[in-house]
Amino acid sequence: MRIKKNIAVSDTGFLFNPSTGDSYSVNPIGMDIVQLMKLNKENDEIKKAIMNDYFCDDATFEKDFYDFTMVLRNYKLLDDE
Amino acid sequence: MAKKIYERPIIRPLNTGMMNKFGTRTEYLPVTHIDGVSVKSLIKQYGSPLFVFSERQMRENIRFAKRTFETRYPKVQFAWSYKTNYLNAICNVYHQEGSWAEVVSRFEYDKAINNGVPGDKIIFNGPDKTDEDLRVAIKNNSPIHIDHLDELYRLTDIATEMKVKPRVAIRVNMDTGIYPMWDRFGFNYETGQAWDAINKILASGKLDLVGLHTHIGTYMLTPSAYGVAAAKMADLALGIKNKYDTVIQYIDMGGGFASQNTLKGSFLKGSDIVPPISEYAEVICTALLNAGFKNTELPTLYLETGRALIDNAGFLLGSVIANKRLSDGRKATILDFGVNILFTSFWYDHKISPAQEFGMHTEDTVLYGPLCMNIDVIRENISLPPLNAGDQVVVHHTGAYTVTQSMQFIALRPAVVMIDLMGKPHVIKKKESLKDLEKNEEMPEFLKQFKLV
Ligand SMILES: Cc1ncc(COP(=O)(O)O)c(C=O)c1O
């Protein structure tokens, strides 16, 4: 899963979609995930990296990650359509 | 490097045009303690969900309200509106603060008697009083507030038969400029119904007309309506003095002052628009003082304030059961309390805070209760930090009409706890059990057995 190329990602937690003018705020862990997606990491690698940085169990992260990507898709920020 | 605390990843669109002039809402600031007692420990000890009442806040409210009226008018008497919350421990806090009781049914009446309120300090309101109820109230010398002519005739007959002169008031409804006008209770002022009832009472000589009562509505955001009402009540009292040389001893202005909850559909939060109690006091007391009563004949002002004295002293604690994503992309959170115990969520957008610390990011969420029913929605849309299953929330301003209107439906009702002035919690109502529920059920012999194959 990839974030669309044209989406601007700031270090301070904002996404900007220049083709629609919409901007979004993302919490820090969400930002970490977005940055990893920007680097074209696979889901497994993303999970490994996050689990490395945060106290969290597998099941919780998988559930939340799935939900998060669904929302990204819903906002048309993903490249996989 | 130490690992960071996990929080669910969230993203939300920024809607620059939507910010209102008060800035962003701070609803999601965590509330971890109530009167110094931690939410977690309360839930651990008494279960979730849980109603919690603050004795300190209740006493502060009634003391403040009394002071506010007493500094403006010489004779004031509060009566606790039982229907607003009639858990006995709650009633007794107000009785300890000097409030009488205001009841609207026989069982509320009996509750007040059992709590130790003297009969002559129980105001008996409401459209449904049986002959038996009236006899008991007469024996106890309780002021009976007559709602309709049928009651007036019945009461007159009973008084004749008992050879006593009961103390009565009539309930008056009127146009105070408020829509909708509450005209289903009592006798109307503008159409002359009120005078008709007064004439009947004073001409018969069988009842002792001691007071006049009104209750113009509830959650009234317009204090000026009370000024209009008080002036009309004073006009009736002065008219009675003129015509019959009878001094009306009290004017009862009922309840209805708004509490700081936010009505559904209101753009502004309740806490930003609800008038302080001093505004109601000012218009009521001014109207009575300026009406033209002789100093020695000034009626006592009775007040039956309910919600404004207790709403902010009650909290509902609950826990998150699960999160899900709806088909239209909205986030939904399922809580362990539903509309069955938070009936007021049908007309209020209750303020809800997380009970643990979170980052500053929030997401828009629908809050559902646990009932397997489509109507079970606590908030259609609220901005909250990413709550996880097992996290706890605090619902604010749930002191009025929640416990008394709660339904035993699908789920059993939770325990109710009061935190005393020293910060010690006391159970004032135990959690409901299946046994409580089935106590009055009976099983006919022929239905006792069945066989399933
Ligand atoms: C006769 C009467 N008095 C007092 C009250 C208490 O009203 P509130 O809780 O709005 O102050 C009510 C409630 O509807 C009422 O009907």
Image (cartoon, coloured by chain):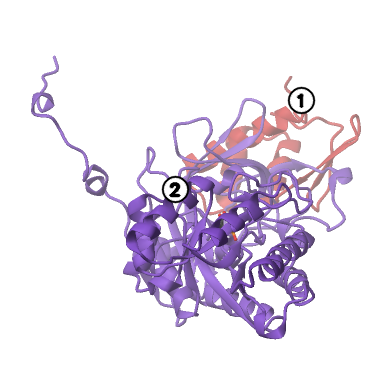
The kind of residue tagged 1 is: Asp
Res. B385 in view? no
Name the chain letter of the residue that bears numbered label 2.
B
Name the one closer to the observer, B77 or A4: B77
Name the one closer to the observer, B146 or B241: B241
The kind of residue tagged 2 is: Asp
Q: How many marks?
A: 2
Res. B181 in view? yes
Q: Is residue A13 left or right of residue B203?
A: right
The quarter of the image holding the N terminus of chain A is top right
Q: In the rendering, at what x and y percent does residue B346 appear?
A: 59, 42
Q: Please report the residue visible at 44 percent of the width from the left and 55 percent of the height from the top.
A: B156
* Residue at mark 2: C-beta within 8 A of ligand 1: no
Q: Please report the residue visible at 58 percent of the width from the left and 60 percent of the height from the top.
A: B397
Name the one closer to the observer, A3 or B44: B44
Give above or below for B345 relative to B300: above
Which of the two discs, 1 and 2, sits closer to the camera? 2
Give the labeled residue for mark 2.
B128
Name the chain letter of the residue that bears numbered label 1.
A
Q: Mark on residue B275?
A: none
Q: In the rendering, at what x and y percent does residue B83 appear?
A: 48, 57
User: In terms of image quarters, where does ligand 1 lie?
Assistant: bottom right
Give above or below for B155 relative to A57: below
Chain for colour purple = B
The quarter of the image holding the C terminus of chain A is top right
Chain for colour red = A
Q: Dot 1, crowdedness within 10 Å: few (<14), some or many (≥20)?
A: few
* Residue at mark 1: C-beta within 8 A of ligand 1: no
Q: In the rendering, at what x and y percent does residue B409 appear?
A: 39, 39
Q: CA distance from mark 1 to mark 2?
A: 68 Å
Give the labeled residue for mark 1.
A79
